[in-house]
Image (cartoon, rainbow, N blue to C red):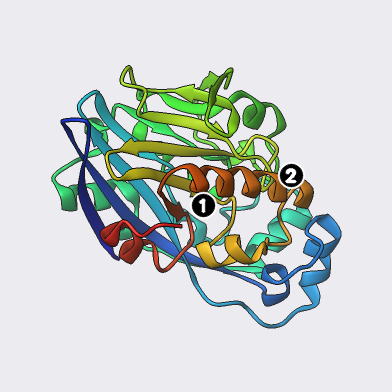
């Protein structure tokens, strides 16, 4: 699996950013191209026999003077086990087992990926979750006794999440995004330097959150599933599993407005071009 590292400064502080691919997933083609995201579009996609292309599942690490921050934890290789989804409701189990494909081994999991950049699970200061879907929380068992930050609205809504699959040790730190940043009226500053922060980017889920890293060369925008790829963001295309199309469009406008003010490097969770974009610090 690919790993990309970028060294960058904010003021005079050196920061390292690592991107890891923790497996791949695929959903039905009609779910990817749905014009009206929502439950009915998701159910309609069950008739489709064709899968869309594989999507990488990215996680990110920010090595910062104030700590080492992990954004999302990726897939668990346990999704390959026959009865992994036995505890979820029938329709959801059918969706995961028949309407999705997963490609991940234990060696692809985030704890193993960290060792490739001379880190390990215990080196992580905080985990920041963009949302609670299975391809973002699968690696949580590797990070017991480490603070896990979750947007309060995401925790309350749990759209498309399955708490029965959460590890028994999961006790997140619920964050109220009560501050502001530029075009975003819901933000939370994680570092004292105020250069790592969470912003609410609702749409894919009610409390979906993106993470921002401010640098001397612009903003790195870790977008989660706001849009699966930069191209889809620009084309305003969203998957059938998106909670609110209207909210997604409003959030995208906030990101575009931010990009009018300063350079934005857009890094969503399922884009095959993320490595090249991070390496080049390519503008949105």
Residue farthest along the left direction in this orientation? 118
Q: Position of residue 247 (x, y in %)?
A: 74, 44
Residue 49, numbered label: none
Q: Which residue is drawn at the image coordinates 58% and 40% (left, top)?
A: 132
Residue shown at 16% from the left, 49% from the top? 117
Q: Counting other residues with Cα less than 10 Å from the Cα at mark 1, is it few (<14), some (14-19), or many (20 or more)?
A: many
User: Disc 1 designates what residue?
Assistant: 135
Tell me if 93 is positioned left or right of 17 in this view: right
Near mark 2 (Cα within 10 A), the count class, few <14, some 14-19 or many ≥20, is: some
- The spot of residue 151 in percent (x, y) is 57, 28
Judging depth in this view, the residue of 75 and 150 nearest the camera is 150
Q: Note whether 118 is above or below 266 in the view shown.
A: above
Which structural element holds mark 1?
Answer: helix
Q: Upstream in the sequence, badge 1 or badge 2?
A: 1
Residue furthest to the bottom in view is 50
Residue 106 located left or right of residue 9 = right
> Would you name the residue on which mark 2 appears?
247
The quarter of the image holding the N terminus is bottom left
CA distance separating discs 1 and 2: 22 Å
Find residue 36 and report its horizontal and vertical position in percent: 82, 62
x, y percent for residue 12? 16, 30
Where disc 2 sits, the SS reads helix
Quadrant assignment, res 65:
top left
């Amino acid at each position: 699996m690919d790993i990309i590292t970028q060294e960058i400064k904010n003021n005079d502080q050196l920061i390292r950013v690592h991107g890891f691919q923790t497996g791949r997933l695929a959903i039905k083609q009609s779910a990817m191209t749905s014009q009206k995201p929502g439950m009915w579009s998701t159910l309609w996609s069950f008739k489709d026999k064709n899968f869309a292309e594989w999507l990488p599942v990215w996680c990110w690490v920010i090595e910062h003077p104030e700590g080492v921050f992990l954004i999302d934890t990726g897939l668990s290789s346990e999704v390959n086990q026959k009865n992994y989804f036995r505890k979820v409701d029938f329709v959801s189990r059918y969706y995961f087992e028949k309407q999705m494909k997963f490609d991940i081994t234990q060696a692809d999991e985030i704890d193993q990926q960290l060792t490739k950049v001379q880190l390990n699970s215990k080196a992580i200061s905080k985990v920041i979750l963009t949302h609670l879907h299975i391809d973002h929380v699968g690696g949580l068992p590797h990070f017991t006794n480490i603070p896990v930050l979750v947007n309060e609205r995401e925790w309350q809504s749990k759209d498309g999440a399955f708490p029965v699959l959460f590890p028994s040790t999961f006790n997140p730190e619920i964050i109220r995004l009560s501050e502001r940043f530029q075009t975003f009226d819901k933000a939370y500053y994680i570092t004292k330097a105020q250069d790592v922060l969470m912003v609410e980017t609702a749409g894919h889920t009610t409390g979906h959150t993106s993470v921002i890293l401010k640098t001397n060369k612009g903003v790195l925008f870790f977008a989660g599933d706001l849009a699966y790829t930069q191209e889809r963001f620009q084309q305003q295309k969203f998957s059938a599993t998106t909670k609110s199309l209207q909210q997604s469009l409003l959030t995208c406008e906030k990101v575009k407005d931010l990009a009018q003010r300063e350079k934005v490097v857009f890094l969503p969770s399922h884009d095959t071009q993320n490595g090249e974009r991070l390496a080049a610090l390519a503008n949105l």
